[in-house]
Every structure is written in structure tokens, then in C-alpha cells.
Amino acid sequence: MTKAEFKAKIQAHFADEVEKLKEDISYAQLEIKKAQVMANLLTECVDHAAEKFGWYGVYEKDEVFTDAVTWIANVCLAV
């Protein structure tokens, strides 16, 4: 057996494990992209809610805060 054949035999032995790890990496990268999109969306929703619900003299009230948070969770983030 040559050194190249020996290396090929080792590679073949671990081929399934390497493929599984590559799939795991692809999935993790997709989850990272999803988290980035959701973080950006949440930031935009907070900005939008501050404009939508934040009028002077009104935003100090607890119910306005609750309405803004509810709107973000149930409307803006409903994807």
C-alpha cells in the first residue's frame, strides 16, 4: 500500500463524519443569518413602535408601553 492509498483509506473511514460536520456548519450558518435578520427586524420594530406610540405626554403611561410591546410582538415580528 502506498502512502497515498493509506491516506485515501483514512479519508474514506472518516468521510461520513466529515460530511455530517459540513452539514452542521451549513445549518449553523443558516441559523446565524436567521438570527441576524431577526435582530435587524427587532431593531426596526422598536424604532417604528417608538414613532407610532411615542407621543409627548403619552409615552409615560404604562398602557402605552404595553401597547407598543404587544404591537411589536404580535404585529411587527409576526413573520
Image (tube, rainbow, N blue to C red):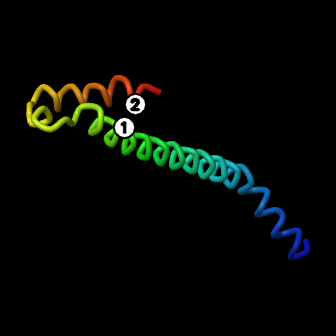
Label located before the other in sequence (1 or 2): 1
Disc 2 secondary structure class? loop
User: Relative to residue 79, is residue 24 depicted above or below?
Assistant: below
Q: Look at 37% across and 45% down and name the residue there.
A: 43
User: Relative to residue 17, is residue 48 depicted above or below?
Assistant: above
- Mark 2 nearby-residue class (10 Å; few <14, some 14–19, many ≥20): few
C-alpha distance separating marks 1 and 2? 7 Å
- Mark 1 nearby-residue class (10 Å; few <14, some 14–19, many ≥20): many
Disc 1 secondary structure class? helix
1 or 2: mark nearer the eye: 1
Position in image of residue 47 (x %, y %): 33, 42
Which numbered disc covers residue 45?
1
Out of 14 and 52, give the one closest to the viewer: 52
Which residue is disc 2 drawn over? 77
Cβ–Cβ under 8 Å for marks 1 and 2: yes
Q: Look at 91% across and 71% down and name the residue there.
A: 1
Q: Hey, what amino acid is under mark 1?
A: Cys
